[in-house]
Amino acid sequence: MSTDDVQSGTESTPVLFPGKPQYLYRYCNADRALQILRDNYMYLAPPSAMNDLIEGTPARVCRYSKEQARELDIRRYMTEGLSRRSAAELIDAKVSVAEQRENFEYFANELVKIAVAMREHSGLISLSEAFNHQKMWGTYGDNHSVACIQFWRDNGQSRVHKHALPVEYSHKDLTGELISRLEEDGSVSSTLLGQLLYLRKTPEWQDEHEWRIMMLDSQPVPENDRKFHFSSSNIRRVFLGPRVPKSKRDEIHALCGERDFVWSVLDVQVDAVTGISSFHGVELHKSLEDFEWHADLALPDKRPD
C-alpha cells in the first residue's frame, strides 16, 4: 500500500490545507538533513525502528472484556444479515460467555499476526508542528548539533502537507473503536488498523506535537518504495542548531546556493543569559504569511510558547 492510500485529503483538497499547521518541522541529524535537502525525499522507516519501543503494538486495540467480546459476536452475526437486535438476542440465548471469549481470542490472535507484520513492513515519517522546540532539538537534533527543516504549504502544492496526519495522545482503550468500525464483512480495514496503531500515542509523547506520513503494508517493501519524494519548493527554511559542526554548516549553506536559494538557511543562536533564540541568515519572504511568521516567532525579542 502506497502513501497515496493513507492521506487526509485528495486532489480536490482546498489549497491552504485547512486544519493543518502553516509549517511542519523535521528535526534530524546533519547527514540526514543533507540527504533530504539534496535528494528531495524522506525515508519511511519501519515502525519497529522507531524510538517508542511499543510503537504499533496491538494491545490497545484488542483488549478483552465481556462487553467487547459480546459486541464482536453481535457484529459477526450481523454480517450474516441479521439485524442488531436479532443478533444480540441470538447471542444472549445461545452463545455462552466462554464461547464469546474464545471467539474474541481467535479474533485477537489473527489481529496480532497482522499488526506484527505491519510493524515490520509499514513505514513512518515523523514531523512536528513545534517550532524551535528545545526538547526536540535535544532529543532528535543530536544535542542541538544538527538541523531542523521547515516545510510549508507551498501555495497548496506541498506533498508533505497533503499526506501528513496528526497524532492523537490518549490512554484510551481502542478496542471498542476498532470493533465498531469493522467492515461489513467483519474484516478489519488496514487503513483503520494503521490509524489506530500509528496515529494514537500515549500522553507521555504529547509535547512532540507530532504529525506523520504513513505507508501501510504487511509484506516486505522494496527499499526504493520507502522513499517519500517531494519538491524542493515544499521546503521553506532550514535552521542549523547552535552546535552544528562547521563542515556540515558549510555544506548545507553551499547546497542552498546550488539550489538557487529555493529555501532560506538560518543559523540558530541561543543567549545563555536570557534563553532567547535568534536566527541569522538571509531571509527571503515569499508571502505576507511568511513575513507575519517571521515577525511573530523568529525575531530575537520573541519567544515561542
Image (cartoon, rainbow, N blue to C red):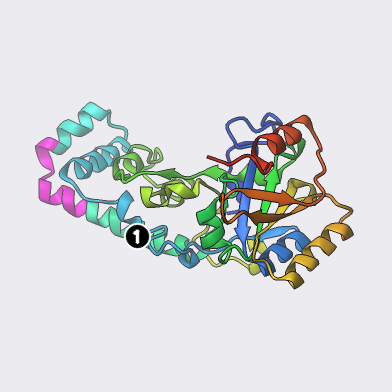
Residue at 83%, 58% (x, y): give it: 256
Q: Nearer the viewer, residue 109 or 149?
A: 149
Compared to residue 301, the image places residue 113 above or below, namely below
Query: How many dots with numbers?
Result: 1
- Measuring from the top left, give residue 216's x and y in whole percent: 53, 55
Inspect the image, locate mark 1, and give the three-letter code of the amino acid beneath it: Val
Asked which quadrant contains residue 73, the reply is top left
Magenta-colored stretch includes residue 145:
no
Instruction: Please give the residue where the numbered disc 1 appears in the rendered image.
Output: 112
Identify the image quadrant of the N terminus.
bottom right
Question: For the stretch drawn in magenta, what is the main secondary structure?
Answer: helix
What residue range appears in magenta? Answer: 92-103
- Measuring from the top left, give residue 118's x and y in whole percent: 46, 60
Asked which quadrant contains residue 23, the reply is top right
Compared to residue 110, the image places residue 23 above or below, namely above
Question: Label 1: how many residues lie within 10 Å, few (<14), some (14-19) or many (20+)?
Answer: some
- Measuring from the top left, give residue 184's x and y in whole percent: 39, 38
Q: Nearer the viewer, residue 73 or 146?
A: 146
